[in-house]
Image (cartoon, grey):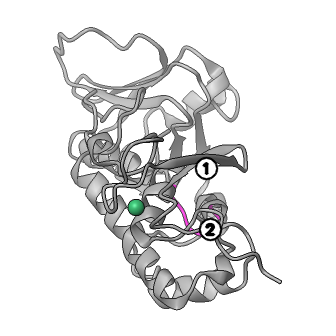
Amino acid sequence: MPELPEAETIVRGLAPVIRERRISSVKVEHADVLDGEADAFSRQLVGRRIEEVGRRGKNIVLVLDSGERLVVNLGMSGRLLHRAPHDDTPPPTHPAVHFELERSTTLVYHDVRRFGRLRVMAAEAYRSWSRSLGPEPLGRAFTGRRLARDLSGSVSPIRSWLLDQRRVVGIGNIYANEALHRARVHPRTPAREIPEKGVVRLHRAVRKVLRDSIQAQGTTLRDYRTARNEEGSYAHHLRVYGRKGEACPRCGTPVKRIVFGNRPAFYCPQCQPEPEPSS
Ligand SMILES: [Zn+2]
């Protein structure tokens, strides 16, 4: 499932090739990925120029010259693919929306499972939505001090806390597990019970795994592709996620898998001891 590094990789791939281009036509093949109706969606986009290509958490955000934003959430299996003029590679197999841009550039939203969502938001609606989300973990507002303060008010298991986009954006199950392993914090530890040193390590670990993954163009387990339809290579660097029974790269103990909050958590029982039951 695409998380911050995957969205960021797509943004970096798209920005130089679609910025400042006008959208000349929109063809919707599967309206179930849209927030509203296909005609209204196309009307809001055709003729608009893309001024900026950015990201908020896991969402890709195209800023239009009307001030509106096209916000793309890739869901489970969404891809946002750029096709240059005269691209002779096979066309995407599950296109949901085609955007034709000036100078024969094509942008295709492709989604096999169609849990993704595309919506056009007015400037004010975008701002209030953005304000409802937590800080960007790679941004300046996400300091160790802020993290310590925010954690201190919560009894949620830390893995669930990290996945909550109102607390901090962009982190999904893969990077939450990886960061907790590096920080040596058990995924079930209540947020407010993480010791001070653990919080410092967690703050560093979150930023490190996200940055390293961006360097590797994200994690492709199955569906995710870059804007150029390439796989990301961070899967080779995962220490615990999806590695049940394999040796912890830090101490050699077999990695354990448990399920809570409807999702698997992977951890090293030696490096990440169970939290003491609180009295
Ligand atoms: Zn270990």
- Establish if 77 lies above or below 52: above
Residue furthest out toward the right: 279
Rendered residue at 31%/11% (across/down): 91
The verdict on residue 168 being magenta is yes
Given the image, on which type of amino acid does mark 2 rest? Glu
Q: Say which label, 2 or 1, has the lower sequence index.
A: 1
Q: Quadrant of the C terminus?
A: bottom right
Q: Secondary structure at mark 2?
A: loop
> Where does the magenta region start and end?
165-171
Rendered residue at 69%/27% (across/down): 37
Dominant secondary-structure state across the stretch colored magenta: loop
Instruction: Please state if 141 lies on the left or on the right of 156 as rendered.
Output: left
Instruction: Please state if 243 lies on the left or on the right of 41 as rendered.
Output: left
Other-residue count near label 2 (Cα within 10 Å), few / some / many at <14 / 14–19 / ≥20: some
Q: Nearer the viewer, mark 2 or mark 1?
A: 2
**Is residue 69 at least partly visible in the picture?**
no
Q: Nearer the viewer, residue 95 or 68?
A: 95
Rendered residue at 55%/28% (across/down): 42
Mark seen at residue 121? 1
Mark seen at residue 133? none
**Is residue 254 at least partly visible in the picture?**
yes
What is the CA distance from the residue labelled 2 to the residue labelled 1? 44 Å
Q: Position of residue 87 (x, y in %)?
A: 18, 16
Q: Position of residue 105 (x, y in %)?
A: 26, 26
Q: Nearer the viewer, residue 159 or 181?
A: 181
- Establish if 192 lies above or below 102: below
Given the image, on which type of amino acid does mark 1 rest? Met
Other-residue count near label 1 (Cα within 10 Å), few / some / many at <14 / 14–19 / ≥20: some
- Establish if 25 lies above or below 76: above
Mark seen at residue 274? 2
**Looking at the image, in which quadrant does ligand 1 appear?**
bottom left
Q: Under 8 Å from ligand 1: the CB of mark 2?
A: no
